[in-house]
Amino acid sequence: MRESLKLFLGAGLLAGSSWIYFSNPPAVMPEINREIALRIINSGEAIKRFDGLSKTSQDEAISYLEGYVLSKTDIGRVVKELLDNVNVSEVIDDKLEPGNYYFHDLTNIISYSSPPSHLKVHQYLQGEPLIFGIAHERMHAIQDLNSKWNEFETFCSSFVSYTEDKSALINFTEKNAQEFARIFLNNSDASYDEARQKFLDLWNDYEATKNERIIIREIQAHLTFQPYTNPAGLYERMQKNHHDVLVAVGKDIFSQAFASSIELMGILDPVKAAEFVGANGESVDVYLQSVKDLKEQMNFVDAYQRGIERQNRLLNEIHQITIEAVRYISQRI
């Protein structure tokens, strides 16, 4: 039996994409509630009150807040659509920090670490419910499903793995070569060496634009659930999980992708936008042109302004989620 091809590919390209929660309170809140809400959040008073509740009352509080978001806000209805209609496996991974979610693009699986109740309510108080994290990763599943690379990623999932530093380990066997030749070369008689070389060529093409693909997908998913209107804030937020990718792409390209994503948010609803990103987000150049073509096709000359208005509406809803969480928890005892 011919020895299989074993490769170790260097770090710097992420195997998937992830949602991480942040603990800073919103910078702006409705003026009438601003002083009391910020005081309660910053003092930890609401969390202390929550911790003093019985387990039953804590569960009731979280259930109430989730129901409020899903039924009383537009962004909650987007979350509900994703939870109800996107079929993707979810598995617990205790190596992740509690409350973090991660979509694996090769296996189309979301891994997560179960958050404790106080973290769940804490994130409602911050205006970033953890159900947004689940929905964020499901956006990535939609993007991935609509990508030209989806079939190739599915094929690779059985013999490509990643180290903790995100380096790719490839174990390309004779059996993999036969399957690759049948699926991608339409030639079941191809030799191992031919299939191996064709696979490596395709893998290199896949990796060549992966950084830009990650950036485009992350921007669109983040903008769906977070009210950024300029690239600097989102660029900073993504540093924790995507530093190497951001460095490789650069701020200028990031800003261009951000601007086109704002336009896209002004043209399509979030789920349709995720489908569009999957199909047209192969590279930033392709993405920019595709958004431009869509804007002209649909005659949305004011797409950017519409996108900004959508983000401002989202900001108002997030403020209301925060205020409702403060009100509900503060009145429980």
Image (cartoon, rainbow, N blue to C red):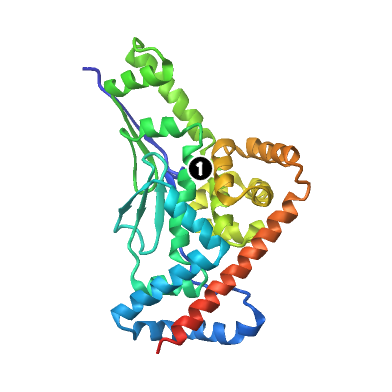
Residue type marked 1: Gln
Mark 1: few/some/many CA within 10 Å (<14, 14-19, 20+): many
Query: Which structural element holds mark 1?
Result: helix
Front residue of this view, candidates 25 and 301:
301
Residue 160 versus residue 84 in the image, above or below: above
Residue 136 visible in the snapshot: no
Task: Name the one closer to the observer, 111 or 209.
Answer: 111
Residue 229, percent from left and from top: 67, 60
Q: Quadrant of residue 113?
A: bottom left
Residue 35 picture location, percent across and down: 60, 86
Q: 211 or 30, which is in the foreground?
A: 30
What is the quadrant of residue 26 in the picture?
A: bottom right
Q: Position of residue 67 (x, y in %)?
A: 45, 68
**At 57% across and 56% down in the image, what residue appears?**
224
Residue pictured at 61% horizontal, 83% vertical = 33
The answer to whether 8 appears left or right of 65 in the picture is: left
Residue drawn at point x = 57 percent, y = 87 percent? 36
Residue 299 in which image quadrant: top right
